[in-house]
Amino acid sequence: MLHTGDKPAPAARGALSFGRGLGHHGLQSQALAAGDPSRHDTHHPICPKGHPMTWLALTGAEFGRGHANRQPAAICLDMPAGQDPEDVIERGSFYLEAAISRTLADDQPLFVLHRTGEITSHVSVQICRDGTIVYGRRLGDQHEQVSLTPDRMQAEGCLRLTVLWDGPARQGLITAEFSANGATVQKAVRDPLPWLAGDVAATPHEAGLGKGLICFGLSDQHLPVGPAPSLAAGTPVRTPGGYAAIETLGAGDLVLTPGGQTVPIRRAMAREVPARGRFGPVRLRAPYLGLRSDVIVSPHQRLLIDGPEVEYLLGEDQVLIEAQALIGTNCAWPAGCGPAITYHQLIFDDHVMLDIAGTPMESLFLGDLRDDPVRLAATELGKGTGTALPLHKKLAYRALREYEAMTLKAAIFSP
């Protein structure tokens, strides 16, 4: 049987004590039975609360780096010793990243976990030929299947799928984000089926992994989706008083743009994320790119570059390029890190360039997030702060697509 607190009285084999609706099966979690007020707050149940993430399992650091042996695929981090395999993780996140293409010849499985025992547990994720993403979950005799169907033109590049569940609140949310164009597709789930402790323990050695899978992870808290910070702690940001570490700056503080303009910070943001895939840290190396010192950024942090090659190949004086596009050159190397990392970013009334250790890099771009309450509620920025978010109608400069970045990289950095 499934356990959410103290061990309940025995039930029939295969029966669910926690499933589609906490309390519908005659069992409450220990926290709810004790009247824990944290379980009855007024926040959106899928809105992150700002607590440090606890990672139960993460893809191993060497996974996806061309190694023939992809097992064990993950490492278990914070599972309590002696936990019963049928104990319920009543609130948490499962995420994965995968490389996808609009021209799939057949349905592509990305992740499959099938575990038999006192309760049969099954999890699967696949992307279909038409771009539909299907998340399947089974616990005992209960099933759920959720399909997300993006526009065919959206389904390309890197897919990041995040599955959030909150059993006590009886709500879940599944989000697909596509890195190539920033497209997002979401679907709310009523009474989502939770993961079990045994599922986490089995994942490192028993999960079936698709060829396109980049990384995955499991947490007992909600991993925010949407715009993410991208500058590591200690990143020097130029201010009127000199360079200051980004984590020391907050709303109302002033910074200087590369052009010398003074702009006030609207809001500062920090978030702990798994140091894998989309968030695997990149070291930008001085003195390349005009840097005065090395800085650590996430792969999707964009830099402003110029030069005759830019103008000749792209017809623009200056363009934005992601840090990950520079990996493999002297400018950028993968940075060693533990299983998780905290990134920071700054938000302004407009999308602006920051002077980061002497090099122009972008502030956080929000787009029209402010006007999409459902999507906003699932982000780190969805927490109430009393400060309305700005609307960013466009990027300060044109951002390169992946193929453009590859072309420019070859022209500038080839021997």
Image (cartoon, rainbow, N blue to C red):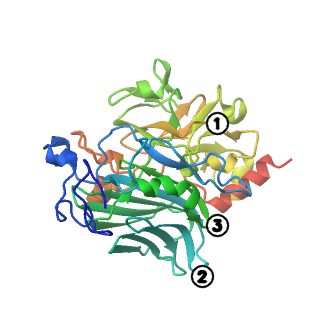
* Three-letter code, disc 3: Lys
Is 352 placed left or right of 318 in the picture?
left
Query: Which x, y percent locates residue 297?
Result: 57, 39
Q: Which residue is mark 3?
A: 211
| Precedes in sequence: disc 1 or disc 3 | 3
Using a 10 Å C-alpha cutoff, classify the residue at mark 3 as few (fewer than 14 neighbours), some (14 to 19) or many (20 or more). few
Q: Which residue is mark 2?
A: 106
Query: Which x, y percent locates residue 279?
Result: 54, 46
Q: Secondary structure at mark 1?
A: loop
Residue nearest the viewer, comparing 232 with 198: 198
* Three-letter code, disc 2: Asp
Distance, label 2 to label 3, CA atoms, is 13 Å
Name which quarter of the figure residue 264 lies in.
top left
Q: How many marks?
A: 3
Residue nearest the viewer, comparing 158 with 181: 158
Residue nearest the viewer, comparing 215 with 390: 215
Pointer 1 with pointer 3, Cβ within 8 A: no
Q: Is residue 140 above or below residue 206?
A: below
* Three-letter code, disc 1: Gly
Using a 10 Å C-alpha cutoff, classify the residue at mark 1 as few (fewer than 14 neighbours), some (14 to 19) or many (20 or more). few
Q: Which residue is mark 1?
A: 336
**Is residue 381 in view from this perspective?**
yes
